[in-house]
Amino acid sequence: MSKYQTQPIKMAPYQIQTISLKELPSGSELIEFLRVEIPYGKTYGRIPFARVLYAFNGVEQKKAVPMDLDKGAFSDSSFENVFEDEELEKTFRKIAPEVFRNAAQQIVEAVSKAAALRQ
């Protein structure tokens, strides 16, 4: 038996708030914004990270792009290793960072508006 004992960490329950982004233009024919998911902790309130879900070339993607809501920014690493198909990956990585950066402020505004309605 180890001299160190571990205690399970009690996680505060949280809910996922979903906000539609279907009206948000992407500026690209290949990328369509679908929705943003924000976790809200009952104890902590809004968590400053969100998942932006999108469709690429008309197909909803399983991997969401993480966004730091406080910074209003996406990490460039968010756009790596998204597709198994090399050509799709190359095309996505070429256009996605700019498309997502251009939409960042509008996504943060949509989240803020939804948070205000929540209170």
Image (cartoon, rainbow, N blue to C red):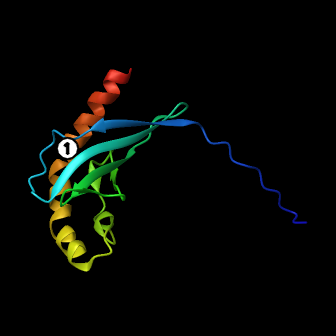
How packed mark 1 is, by other alpha carbons closer than 10 Å (few <14, some 14-19, many 20 or more), is some
Image coordinates of residue 65 in percent, x first then y, are 32, 56
Q: Quadrant of the C terminus?
A: top left
- Element at label 1: helix
The residue depicted at 15 percent of the width and 65 percent of the height is: 95
Q: Quadrant of the N terminus?
A: bottom right
Image coordinates of residue 28 in percent, x first then y, are 10, 57
Left or right, 34 with respect to 4, comes to left
Q: Report which quarter residue 10 is drawn in.
A: top right
Q: Disc 1 marks which residue?
A: 105
Left or right, 41 with respect to 84, comes to right
- Please tell me whether residue 28 is drawn above or below residue 80 in the rendered image: above
Q: Nearer the viewer, residue 8 or 87?
A: 87
Outermost residue, right side: 1
Image coordinates of residue 90 in percent, x first then y, are 20, 75
Image coordinates of residue 18 in percent, x first then y, are 35, 37
Which residue type does callout 1 highlight?
Answer: Gln
Q: How many marks?
A: 1
Q: Nearer the viewer, residue 23 or 79?
A: 23
The residue depicted at 36 percent of the width and 59 percent of the height is: 63
Outermost residue, bottom side: 86
The residue depicted at 15 percent of the width and 42 percent of the height is: 24
